[in-house]
Image: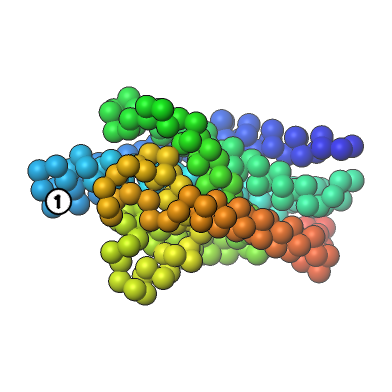
Amino acid sequence: MGWRPLKALIGREMAKLFRQRGRLLSAMVRPLIWLLVIGSGIGSMLGEQGDSGYREFLAPGIIAMTLLFGSLMASLTLVYDKELGIMRMLMIAPFPHYQIIIGKLIAGTLASLVQGALLITLLLLVGYLNLSAALLALFAAMALTALACAALGVLIAVFAKALDNFAVIMNFVIFPVFFLSGALYPVAPLPPVLRAVATVNPFSYGVDLLKHALQRNAPHPFGPDFTLVADLAVLVTFTLVAVAIACLRFSLEAVHAPLIHRLTKRS
């Protein structure tokens, strides 16, 4: 059977994404609100050049936010499948269970990249972004960041037994991950405790990787906070560890048996 089930899983998730036009629209509106409201508000306190300058600094963080929210929302389908009984059919299908996680991971990555690409197009149209020769570097940074965010999403999803659990865990995780990442302000000037938290936050390195693509020549402290090697090492390591844990958790028979029995009783 090979990888045909994996392709089917990815195709199903992408078809659902393009059918949900409201989801794509909200993915565009949310970052623009942050960029216009937060960017203009904080930028106005920085002097005459602060408004446009801070919005330029904010662009990588807003792109990273779109990737983060898009990946986590895509991972929500893993919990939906448990609730609706679809997961029971997938679990008894003749292919390895880890392919379900890999399929959700790739689908979440692609879904967030689609939303990120739409946002970049919109930012280019309104003049808030100037890519010049950084297009390839930006795409590579987005792909690795989206992959790490999708890994975080599936890791949360495999530990959530219901939609309510996923929502609580996601809200508990997503805001500290985003606010303490260097997306809205540089990491270096933060107080020691917050700087330490931002340093161990893997999402910080995704934001920083986008800064390397878009703002590597920006003046201190508005340029990258970490080295390019550190960004790549942390993101790759986190992604591999998160996916390994998610696959192991998902494959444990003790975890899936209650789910299958519960759905069997309902049917």
Picture coordinates of residue 162, whole percent (x, y): 63, 61
Position of residue 62 in the picture relative to residue 115 (left or right): left
Looking at the rendered image, the quarter that the N terminus falls into is top right
**Residue, x 42% and y 51% (percent of image)?**
208
Position of residue 50 in the picture relative to residue 265 (left or right): left
- 25 above or below 224? above
- The answer to whether one can see residue 47 in this image is yes
**Residue, x 56% and y 30% (percent of image)?**
18
Q: Check the image and tell me how it is coloured.
A: rainbow
Picture coordinates of residue 73, whole percent (x, y): 54, 48
Residue 17's image quarter? top right
Position of residue 79 in the picture relative to residue 27 (left or right): right
- 62 above or below 160? above
Position of residue 220 in the picture relative to residue 153 (left or right): left
Picture coordinates of residue 134, whole percent (x, y): 42, 32
Residue sitting nearer the eye, 244 or 263: 244
SS label for mark 1 = helix
- The answer to whether one can see residue 157 in this image is no
**Residue, x 64% and y 40% (percent of image)?**
107
Extreme-bottom residue of the structure: 193
Extreme-left residue of the structure: 48
Picture coordinates of residue 244, whole percent (x, y): 71, 59
Residue labelled with disc 1: 46
Residue 165's image quarter? bottom right
Looking at the rendered image, the quarter that the C terminus falls into is bottom right
Residue sitting nearer the eye, 187 or 95: 187
**Kind of residue indicated by mark 1:** Leu
**Residue, x 30% and y 66% (percent of image)?**
190
